[in-house]
Image: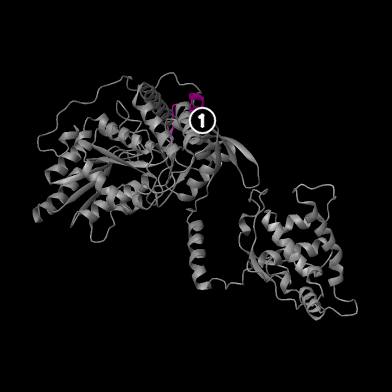
Amino acid sequence: CNHFFAFLPFFATSTGMASPTSACPYSGFMQTVLFKQLHQQVHQKPFADPAKCPFMQLTQLSQRLKAIQTTPEMAAHLLNMDPSANPLALPKDTIEELKNLKNLMPALRPPSEVPVQPAPEPAPELALRQIPDDEDGEANTPRIMQQPIESPTRTGKYSVKPFPKMDNAIAQHFDSFLENLHKEGRYRVFTEVERHANNFPNATRYEKDGRTQEIVVWCSNDYLGMGQDPEVVEACTNAVRSWGTGAGGTRNISGTTHSHVLLERQLAAHHNKEAALVFNSGYVANESALSTLGALLPGCEFYSDDENHASMIHGMKGKGVKKFIWRHNDLKHLEELLKASYLKNPDTPRVVAFESVYSMSGTISPIGDICDLARKYNALTYLDEVHAVGMYGPHGAGVAERDQVMWKVDIIQGTLGKAYGVVGGYVASSAAIVDSIRSKAPGFIFSTSTPPHVAAAALASVKALRGVKGVMKRFTFHTNVQKLKQMMRAAGLPLMEGESHITPLFIGNPTLCKKASDMLMARHGIYVQPINYPTVPKGTERLRITVSPVHTEAHMAHLVNSAVSVFRELEIHLAATAQSEIPSVVVEAAPAPTPKVAQRSQVAPPSGCPMHAQA
């Protein structure tokens, strides 16, 4: 039996007999010349009394060991141990049998006069190297590939046969792609950072050679620092202790927990809609929701703003779906496109998809006017508020709430991974639309559910930002945005003006953009990520800077003065009226809105609005 044969290699090792270096104890020993000779010797000279045959005794002992759940390896280890030590609590007769068998094994060795023919040495085989548990894998990461195992007896079932290399013609495509990225200066290098709890925006940067550098983060989308808010952290840790770490399945199969339901109810109320649906990311939410609209609405036509996010663009690429792109925030152009379609067929389903805050330019869309125009031509509106939720509006529901037009929007999409400081995305709309997306979108149906502790943390964050804490954080946040922009203008930095919190510095060259980012990091401990194509069009490369409520005026002055120094060295344009140096404390700054807890707008929607029930 396998259990008996599994014992032999370890027993032979403990008695000094040759044992193969095979990863398969069930087959390796039986294929050695030694085993074959032992078997032949016993076969030619069988014991008269079967009870005295070592092979029979091994079989019986193996069965006893199995009965008391002792592995052969552990039993064989006892042969070299002090007889008085018996950590396995084996019966005394079993230990005696082990000792007797150890004495009998030399009788089975082949006579010295019989030459032992070594097995032919095969070519080294290939096997996947397993990284030991005590290694962090850093040094081995580039070598996670097939490696030769120098063993003449590597013939067990776990060995890996040599595999042909990838065809050079195919491999060349990948090499050419990466080479072009390097030539164009668009190759993306991930910066390895470790944020410090309760000490944001400070962080530690890890370099490839193992060195570390203390830095200040200026490009995080955790706009309000809620990722380290004590209430959010406590909600997350309590949920982990109560429920564990994973959801255990998709939402349809054991993955819908009470925390998911509570979060979706909170988000629906937050946006004054009938229902909401949570996704694993904002990208998945956009792609899933828009693609579902295209699949469910026959002959659907999408009208997309020129600066829409990639996730929205991909969601509007369904089979048989038409897409029209209107110039950024150009209502006249949008109406021309909608009117032309409406005159052809008034009943054609149309969806106007746009964002409230555009993350790369910092512009804000005229949400109310776009909604009026869409309803005029019988079109649905789909609004992406990912860079606005938590930061705009009396309760942090976004620009639509700030402008008192939230009831005009048919579908609102948001994220939990930016101002709310967690991860995930969601859509909020009528119950019928949300239920249709829930029942149709593959990105939702076939994805493992968001972990319940993530949902609990997001719920705590949304609740906090809807209340007084949110009012104060938003006030400090927008005050800091105005201070930083004022400093940049005074220093002559090429600020791309916009009414939102987005603060981009125009570079216009991918190589210079990357150099500026690297120099700010290496010399000044400032982490600002370069933004290149395809995130932005070629020739519009920029440094995208985001301030938070916890950045101080000293932080801002250090950033601006460091940027001026780097820009001058790289000969990036600065305004002629720039100040020589920005003081660390700014006495005057553009005023921010006075914080106040406002009630939701009571403006009534027109009687024909399908969202009247949510107003």
On the image, the x and y values in percent for residue 506 come to 41, 42
Query: Does residue 98 appear left or right of residue 291 in this picture?
Result: right
Q: Does the magenta stretch include residue 553?
A: yes
Q: Please say whether residue 581 is visible from this viewpoint.
A: no
Query: Does residue 262 appear left or right of residue 244 in this picture?
Result: left
Residue 202 picture quarter = top right
Q: What residue type is labelled 1?
A: Phe
Query: Does residue 526 appear left or right of residue 371 in this picture?
Result: right
Which residue is nearer to you in this view: 571 or 495? 495
Residue 78 picture quarter = bottom right
- The residue identified by callout 1 is 200
Figure colour scheme = one colour
On the image, the x and y values in percent for residue 601 come to 21, 26
On the image, the x and y values in percent for residue 333 come to 19, 47
Q: Residue at x 14, y 54 (%)?
A: 348
Question: Which residue range is magenta in the image?
Answer: 546-558
Q: Is residue 515 magenta?
A: no
On the image, the x and y values in percent for residue 266 come to 32, 32
Query: Does residue 327 appear left or right of residue 204 in this picture?
Result: left
Quadrant the C terminus occupies: top left
